[in-house]
Amino acid sequence: MSKTKTGETIENVEFPTFDASKTTDQIRAFAEKGVEQSKEAYTKLKTGAEETQKVLESTFETAKTVSSDLSLKTIAALRANAEAGFSHLEALIGAKSLSEVVELQTAFLRKRVETTVEQAKEFQAVASKAAEDVSKPVKTAFEKALKDIKAA
């Protein structure tokens, strides 16, 4: 009989038995858990994609509306400027003297500068609101996604 380092004989050593049914159950449980986690991940991905699609649709619709508003504001400004120009031209044609022409021209230029400043402020306000309206859904969705990631 051969002796081991501890002094026992090999006949006294018991080797654990291998139970294949326990291993199969463990592998099955592991696989089922993997499938369940995959289903959860797919569901989260699908939900995220649907939410993103809704946000993009909302953003594009808002951008379309804002674009229309800006276009209408631009057309109104162009119309007002054209009418002012034609009115000024009529006034110049009716002027009786050079001093009256200079006076009309000075008043017209002063009024044009004032109007241009007012129009620029209106455009800035509309553009700022437009940028805010267009970016708001995206910002909200991004914040929600970050919150969900932190929660997970």
Image (cartoon, rainbow, N blue to C red):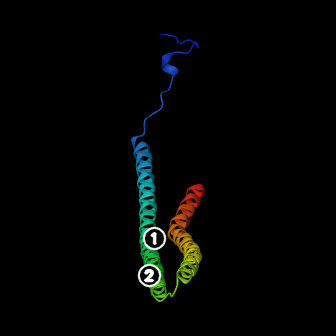
* Element assignment for label 1: helix
Q: Is residue 61 left or right of residue 100?
A: left
Please report the residue visible at 45 percent of the width from the left and 46 percent of the height from the top: 26
Badge 1 amino acid:
Thr
Pointer 2 and pointer 1: residues touching (CB < 8 Å)?
Answer: no
Any mark on residue 82, and which?
Answer: 2
Depicted 50 relative to depicted 146: above or below? below
Any mark on residue 109, and which?
Answer: none
Depicted 147 relative to depicted 130: above or below? above
Q: Which corner quadrant of the image does residue 148 belong to?
A: bottom right
Badge 2 amino acid:
Ala
Q: CA distance from mark 2 to mark 1?
A: 34 Å
Q: Which corner quadrant of the image does residue 83 belong to?
A: bottom left
Lower position in the chain sequence, tag 2 or tag 1: 1
Relative image position of residue 8 (x, y in whole percent): 55, 15
Relative image position of residue 61 (x, y in whole percent): 42, 75
Q: Quadrant where the C terminus lies?
A: bottom right
Q: Nearer the viewer, residue 106 or 135?
A: 106
Q: Residues within 10 Å of mark 2 (few under 14, many from 20)?
A: few
Q: Nearer the viewer, residue 109 or 63?
A: 109
Q: Nearer the viewer, residue 57 or 75?
A: 75
Q: Which corner quadrant of the image does residue 53 belong to?
A: bottom left
Please report the residue visible at 49 percent of the width from the left and 17 percent of the height from the top: 10
Q: Please name which of the two marks, 2 or 1, marks the residue nearer to the observer.
A: 2
Q: Residues within 10 Å of mark 1 (few under 14, many from 20)?
A: some
* Element assignment for label 2: helix
Any mark on residue 59, and which?
Answer: 1
Relative image position of residue 49 (x, y in whole percent): 42, 63
